[in-house]
Amino acid sequence: MRIVSLILGIVGGIAGMCGAAFALFVGGVDAAFSASGTSSVVSLGVIAIFFSLLGLIGGGLALSKPKVAGVMMLISAIGGVISISWGYAVALPILLAGGIFALIGKKEKGEAI
């Protein structure tokens, strides 16, 4: 289960980065064409990048500290969906599954850690 949560955390973090980059692109286009020149979507995209990095770090910690990694991936999933909603739609189920697997997973027999 730890290896599955490692893979899901990394894939979910990368998917979240893609969603955040899309939000930054949309926010930049909105800022370019709006009268005031600012867009709240850009700041939400930056927040989503933070949550994506949190998911990546959580995925990386899945083998050594699975409980901490699970909590980090769950926070990343929920925070990313709050910040950019549909832009995080691909990363949400992946990070949720990775976080749950990290929290409930047990050490396999052949695993040295």
Image (cartoon, helix red, strand yellow):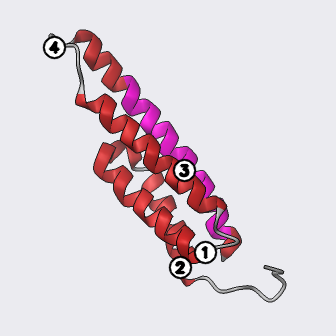
First in residue order: circle 2 vs circle 4: 4
Dominant secondary structure (helix, strand or loop) of the stretch shown in magenta: helix
Reading the image, the residue beneath label 2 is 103
Disc ID at residue 13: 3
Count of labels in the image: 4
Q: Is residue 107 magenta?
A: no
Q: Nearer the viewer, residue 59 or 65?
A: 65
Q: Quadrant of residue 10?
A: bottom right
Mark sitting earlier along the chain (3/4): 3
Q: Position of residue 55 (x, y in %)?
A: 52, 56
- Residue most extreme to the left: 35
Kind of residue indicated by mark 2:
Leu
Residue appearing at x 48%, y 46% in the figure:
16
Q: Earlier in the sequence, mark 1 or mark 3?
A: 3
Sequence-first tag of 2 and 1 = 1
What number is the disc on residue 36?
4
- The one nearer the camera, 7 or 83, is 83
Bounds of the magenta segment: 4-25
Q: CA distance from mark 1 to mark 4?
A: 46 Å
Q: Position of residue 43 (x, y in %)?
A: 31, 33
Q: Secondary structure at mark 2?
A: helix
Q: CA distance from mark 1 to mark 3?
A: 16 Å
User: Regarding mark 4 in the picture, which secondary structure is present there?
Assistant: loop
Label 2 crowd bin: few (<14), some (14–19), many (20+), radius 10 Å: many
